[in-house]
Structures are given as C-alpha cells and as structure tokens.
Amino acid sequence: PEFKLSNKSLVYARFTIARRERDVAPAFSLTPTSGVVPPDGDLMLSLVYHPTATGTYTREHYDVSTPGGNVLTIEAVGEAVGPVVELSKASVNFGDVPIELPRRTVGRVLEIFNRSAVPVPFQLHGVEPNGIFAVSPTSGVLPAGLSGFVNLHFSPDEPGNYYKRVHVLFANRAPLVIDVLGTGYTDKRRPMTLALKDVRGYLARERRGLHLLSPEDLEARAAARREAVASGQEPEEEEEVARDDGAAAAEREVMQAVFRGSSSAESALHFDEEYLDFGACSRLRVGEPRTVRLFNRTSGKLVVYWVVPGGYADGGARDKEGPAFSVSPATAELLPHSSATFRVQFRPRSDQQYFCQRLECVASFKSMRSFRLVTPDSMTPPWTLALTAHGHTFPAVGEQFASKPRLSHRTLTFPACHAGDTTYQTISLANEGDTPMHFAIAPDPAGIFAVVPPIGVVPPGAIQMLALRFSPREVAPYQCSLCIVLNHSPASQLRLQLLGAGARASLHMAHGGRLFMPTTCVGASSRASIRLTNPSRLPIAYEWDLTGRGDELLAVSPAAGVLQGHESVDAVWTFAPTSPTQHLLKVPCLVSALDDAGGGASHDIVRQLLTVSGAGSSGNIRAEPEMLHFGPVLVGQSHRRQLALVNSSAVDLFYEVTFERTANSAMEEPGEGERVGCSKPSGLVPARNSVLISVELEAWTRGDVEYAVLCTLAAGAGGYGGARA
C-alpha cells in the first residue's frame, strides 16, 4: 500500500524513518527511508510486506523523526498465510486384486486442487515410483487456480494386505495425507479384505498408546467388553473412533509422522537407521553389503516381506531393466519383542549415475495371512517401512555433474515458538539443470533444527520438497547455517540460514503493574485504563481472575482475550466502592501461550498480578440558596432564577434534578396552571466545586406556586445523598 506523509508547516521538513524492532529480520520494506517534504506538501510512502514463513504474524513500528524533535509512529501489521490446496479424496482403496498371470494392475487417479492465485510446488513424500503402490508423478507444480493429477497403481506379487500413509508436502503450507490400501489374493491363500475402518481403528489405538497389542490381545479386550455388557456392568471404555485423517489432518500431527520416519523407537516397528549410504561403487563388482536391523515392539508374531523396486525409474535404459539394490533374506518372521538383521547390497548397472531408492518393508501379524484366523475385532492393517538406500557410480577421483540448483529460501525465519514446542516449515529445492542432482544436508549439531529428507537425488527439471523443524529448548534466539552439498562436491554448496526464537508467555503491564483508581463516591463508579502489551512475537491468551472482593469492587473490559506478537490492548477497569475506606486489591491475570496447533501440548499458565488501589468516599451535595424566590410574576411569561449546586466532598458527583409540587400551591392540578424546568437536569459537579443551573417558571393562571427542587446523585454514577431547595 501507499500513504501520504504530509508537512503542514511553512518550512521544508527533513525526515528519517527508522525501524524500532531489532529482534528479527524485517518483514516490511518502507521506502523512502529519508527525504524532504516541501512546505504544505505531501510525499508518498510505499510499504511492502514480504514474509518468509507461513503462519508468521508481524507487527512492526517505524518512527518518522525530524530534526526539530517531531516523531510520528507508523504501525505495520501483516499475517502470512499459505495457499489453499485440497485433495480430491482422503483415501484410495484398491480393494481385492487377484494375483495371476499375466500380472494384473489396478489404477486410481488422485486430483490435487490449487484454489490459490499462485503456483504451488508439491511432492508425495517417501513414495517410490516402482514401489508397492506405484506413483507417477511423485512431484510437480500446481498452476494457479488449476489442478494436477497423480496416477496410482497397485499390482501385488504376494498375497496379503497392503497399506501406506502418503504425506503430500506443499511449499508454504501445511501438508496433507492420503491413506492408500489394497489386498492381494490367490486361490490358495486369501486374507481378509482390508477396509478403511480397520485403518482408522488402528490409528485410534495408536493415539491411545495401544498400537503394540497383538490380535490375541485385541480379541481378549473385545471379549471382556462383551462379557461386561452381558452382566450389566460398565464396560471398559471403548476405543475412540478415529477422526478423518485425510485432508483435514492437523499440520503438527502430520509433520511429526514425517520426521518420525522409519527409525523412531516409539513406533511399533522401526529400523536402527533409515538411510544407508553405499558411497562410490563400481558396476563391475558387488560392493560391500550394509546391514540394517528391524525391531518388533509388538506382542505378536510378525511376517516380514521386502518389496524391492524392479528398476531404477530415474536412471538410464539399463538401470530400468533390473533392481539396483537387493535385500536378503527377502522374507522373515519376527517373534514378539525381538529383532532381525537384513543385508542390503548395491548392484548398479550403469556408470556415472546417482542412485537413491526406497526399499519397502511390509510387516503384518502372521494370523493376518488367512481370513479364517481373523475376526473383525482382531483385524490389524500392516506396517510399511521405507529404507532409503543411495550410492553412485562416479570415479573416486574426478569431476561429477555440474549442478544448477534453485533454493526457494536462502534465509528462513521461523515464527516465534514456545520453548519446548516445535514448529514446522516447508521449502523447495529445484534442479534447473539437464542432469540429475544429488544433495546431502549436514545435520544441526545442536539438534535445534532438522531437515527431512537429509539426502536424495533430484531428477533434471524436477523439484524436491524439504520439511524443516524448529524445536527451541530455552527462551533465546537461535540460528544455524546448514550446508547443502551438491553432487558430492565441496566446491558446490548451498547455505541455508535458519533463524528462530524460543519464547514463553508473558504480559507487560504499564506503570509497573500498578493501577490507581480515582477517589469514588460510595455507590458510584469510576474508570481507569492500563495498557497490556505482549512483549514477544509469541501469540498469548489472557484472562483476569476476579474472585472474592475483586468481583464486588472491580470490573474489567475486556475480561479475556488474545494478543498477537507485540500487540497491545487497553484494559478498562471500573471501580465501585461499597464503603468509604481505602481499598488495595491484587488481581491475578492468567497468561498462557496460545494452543492454536492441533495436537499441541498444553502450556503452563502464568499468574501475573495487577495491584489496584482506590478509595471510597461519602459524597454530599447542597443547593444555594436553599429557598429560591421568584416573587410576583406575570402570567404567560417565562421567568428564570439561578441555583448553585455545591459539591463540598473530595469526589466528583453526578446529579439529577427533579421537581416535586408541594401542598402550598394554590393550583388544584399540577401542570395545568404552570410549567417548571431547569437548564441542566443532569450533569457532573466536580469535587470541591459548584455548578450553576437555571430554574425556569412559567405560570398560565393566577395563584401561588410552590415546588420542591430535588437534586439527587445519579444511580450508578453518583452516590447516596442529595439536596433539597
């Protein structure tokens, strides 16, 4: 936007503009930052908002100062939001697929809608083009306002159930997930068909920490529930029905799964390492094998089956003819709470090639192999773990391909994060060259920042999405410069500067957290305000705890609210004393970080005290003179006399003036023979001060007229007591 800077004086005004906040890199650009405004002239200023991270709320202040000491403040506020992207479906179910010759393949199409006005890069994270569920394309760019299509194919070669949760990463927005499942069978072996409700039931058990139960354990729990219902007892709490974890899944939960990967010790099954680096190998001989260990933390016996891609989709013609990696043994059985070791070998078929593939390990309970051994209560979907193996066939001495990368962010500033919490962002790495590009990202030694995937190969003209994690441990600024090595060449590097700040919820109260209320008449009320400021960039929620005496004497507006980073609000307090004494109250304000991310942990509530002091006083008002004589007046004309309302107390008093006809009046019916009023029927009499009002009388018939003028303190604004004239 643009706005005017006006000079209303008769001389030239030289000005400079300085940014007040210095804790993070600026998100606004204000131009020009200095200049001269002619007398009685204007100068246009331009303000541009350029945030680097989605979910960032920015409030910055710019001081416009002149040599004469005049200072104006410009407050700039902006919030960065990501593009709107949707999936056409939350799950893809291939159903029952027979295993026969010629091999049958079933296809499905996933549509990704881009509802925003900007192109959006995307990638299906952790999928293999030639895996259990073949995916094409695995990455791309969604045009603005249009949609893209992803083809999925299922062609099992072993009977059993297959399931994989696919995370779809997008640039500058939260990821989405899609559940892909199917069942392969033969005439000799037919497992129970895997349904989406079975997947959701397992996900619900995983959230409750019951994902390690065996089918026998699940049967026993179901039988116990049925027996409890039959005997009229309260059954054990039913497992929660899993919510729809498709496109509406919370960002934090999805990102946790992305970073958990296949080597998290909290999972039911996990590898001891997720990435195997074979380095440089020759196609003329078999390289040294690498070993990987698979751990079974469940209470049941598992059957493990490896699915190795039959060819390298991103390689040459010879690479597509056969597998580049092999695993032995290809199948195994794991006892409960045990482990198994597998040997992985790298067998490249071409020279001067980068290789990076995901070898998928499918594990399921042994009883799941036949529908005769399974009941609806014990049905459990399989686990699919991806092991990333990579290597290359370039000579140890010699140059590799020249890289042509494009990183979407060279510097990324994370939004403020509560100490002990985690926040996520997504950026992209594009290969603008015509040869494959290998990348490897060195980890953060402190473990504050993390990147997934840390290694991979970007095909020519393709894009790779990188998920970033920031986990501050303390209230402090953090920064890390990550090195991205391209094509194994130390001379070909990119630097990714990551910045973040850990914060805790706090509230800054003006005047040192003390509020002085004006001396107030008993039964009346007074108001005063105090400014509350959020000193950090962390959004907070606050609520005043008015209990006991505070609830009787004080009221506040707003009583609760949310403050974004560096935002301020004026809390207006109302003081209504009930006795003419001094009052001293300490009112707690409950402050907590805003739990706005699904799946986030609750934060500690901080109690901050506001000291409120005020005094109640008795008020009294009198009228002078006490007897107001009009004397003989002419019928039909209006006559006025001055009456003084005197406030001798130490508090301001609000008054109301009314007129009451007395018995001494000769008129038979009030209001028929005269009219009585005043110029100021209500108002304020300051402390130890007086106010003059004009009393008007107009008689329409002959006779004596007598009224009592009543001055009372206004209800809710004044106190008790009054005057009579």
Image: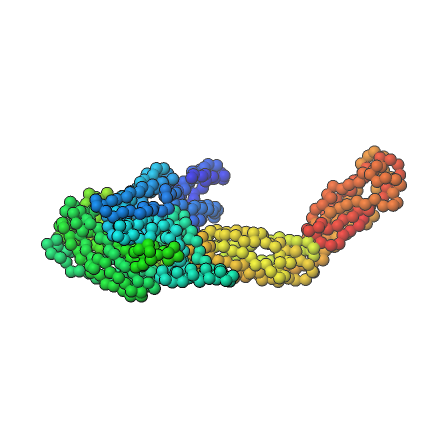
Foreground of the two, 625 or 215: 215
Foreground of the two, 523 or 34: 523
* Residue 321 percent location from the top left of the image: 16, 47
Say if 82 sits above or below 423 in the image.
above
Colour scheme employed for the rendering of this structure: rainbow
* Residue 43 percent location from the top left of the image: 43, 38
Quadrant where the N terminus sits is top left
Residue at the spot 73% in from the left edge and 44% down from the top edge: 681
Quadrant of residue 694 in the image?
top right
Residue at the spot 26% in from the left edge and 44% down from the top edge: 105
Residue at the spot 42% in from the left edge and 60% down from the top edge: 222
Say if 669 sits above or below 715 in the image.
above
* Residue 713 percent location from the top left of the image: 73, 51
Foreground of the two, 390 or 639: 390
Say how many tags the image has.
Answer: 0
Q: Is residue 475 visible?
A: no
The residue most toward the left is 284
Quadrant of residue 462 in the image?
top left
Say if 432 sits above or below 265 in the image.
above
* Residue 512 percent location from the top left of the image: 53, 60
The residue most toward the top is 636
Q: Is residue 381 visible?
A: yes
137 with respect to 664 (left or right): left
604 with respect to 142 (left or right): right
Residue at the spot 57% in from the left edge and 59% down from the top edge: 545
